[in-house]
Image (cartoon, grey):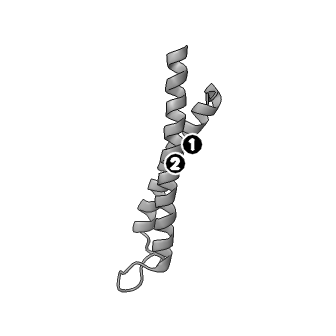
Amino acid sequence: MKLSRPVSWFLLAFGVWSWVIWVTFVKNLIKDGSGLAFDDAGDPTGYFWVHLLLAVASFALGTGVGVIGFRGVRALRRTS
């Protein structure tokens, strides 16, 4: 399967964007002072674990999509 140039760049950009957004979110989640992510004793709450799981899944999906886009861009450069 051959991806077009715009699709390849979009997938690559989406993968990078996913990492930027979710890394920022995890940093903010760890520094949370509102009481949602950590209870009074400093232990992680259910909110923390669910959102950490969402971030890990998004890292994996973003990486997969970004790799597909990168391979598409690289293949287009070799043929051009």
Assign a secondary structure to mark 2. helix
Could you tell me which quadrant the C terminus lies in?
A: top right
Q: Which residue is mark 1?
A: 14
**For residue 62, which numbered disc appears in the image?**
2
Q: Nearer the viewer, residue 53 or 22?
A: 53
User: Residue lying farthest bottom?
Assistant: 40
Q: Nearer the viewer, residue 20 or 79?
A: 79
Above or below for 21 versus 72: below
Q: Is residue 62 visible?
A: yes
Amino acid type at circle 2 is Gly
Residue at position x 50%, y 45% in the image: 64
Q: Nearer the viewer, residue 51 or 28?
A: 51
The tag earlier along the polypeptide, 1 or 2, is: 1
Q: Is residue 21 visible?
A: no
Amino acid type at circle 1 is Phe
Assign a secondary structure to mark 1. helix
Residue at position x 35%, y 81% in the image: 42
Residue at position x 52%, y 24% in the image: 75
Total numbered badges shown on the rendered structure: 2
* Residue 68 % position (x, y): 53, 37
Label 2 near label 1: C-beta < 8 Å?
Answer: yes
* Residue 18 % position (x, y): 52, 49
